Image (cartoon, helix red, strand yellow):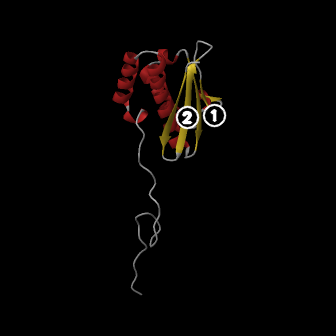
Amino acid sequence: MEAAQTYGRKKNATAVAYVKRGKSGEGMIRINGHPLQLLEPEILRFKVYEAILVVGEDKFAGLDIRVRVKGGGQTSQVYAIRQAIAKGIVAFYQKFVDEASKKEIKDILVAYDRSLLVADPRRCEPKKFGGPGARARFQKSYR
């Protein structure tokens, strides 16, 4: 069974993509069991399509991709999904196709948007005492 498993992360959202060669030739992408066409919000759906359209739909033709995503908000989940899909296709091509086509896909993705393959390390800073947030302090008063 030809399959590759990868993950994508953004803030607290984690998406795990399971890429395998599909039985049917058209190639389907499902997110938490639902087809990609039903992903909400609609505006962010195109962010996920970016990963597919930049590489070219022909590369996804025979592949089935199942994505599980949890944690975070809507936007960070979408960014985690697109990263997991992009990393999944690269991993699949490295494992089961050839190194040259994997390098070609990777170069296209990095040239378009580096966050498709490289996770954003920024995290929320913890709140400290003496103020309402991580850096802000309570207002000083003399009486």
Residue 32: image tag: 1
Amino acid type for the residue under numbered disc 2:
Val
Q: Residue at x 42, y 15 (%)?
A: 98
Residue holding disc 2? 16
The secondary structure type at the circle numbered 2 is strand
Location of residue 25 by image quarter: top right
Residue occupying the point 38% across, 25% down: 106
**Residue 60 image point, x, y percent:** 51, 18
Look at the numbered disc 1 and give the secondary structure of its residue.
loop
Q: Residue furthest bottom?
A: 143
Report the quarter where the C terminus lies: bottom left
Could you tell me residue 47's position as x and y percent? 48, 33
* Front one among 75 and 126: 126
Task: Tell me the distance, in whole angstroms, between the alpha carbons under discs 2 and 1.
Answer: 10 Å
Q: Quadrant of the N terminus?
A: top right
Q: Position of residue 99 (x, y in %)?
A: 39, 18
Question: Mark 1 belongs to which amino acid?
Answer: Asn
Query: In the depicted view, which residue is nearer to us: 32 or 87?
Result: 87
- How many marks do you count on the picture? 2
Q: Residues within 10 Å of mark 1 (few under 14, many from 20)?
A: some
Residue at the extreme right of the image, as rendered: 33
Q: Is residue 12 above or below residue 96?
A: below
The reply to whether callout 2 and callout 1 are in contact (CB within 8 Å) is no
Above or below for 77 versus 57 = below
**Residue occupying image coordinates x 39% and y 85%:** 142
Residue 89 x, y percent position in the rendering: 48, 24
Q: Earlier in the sequence, mark 2 or mark 1?
A: 2
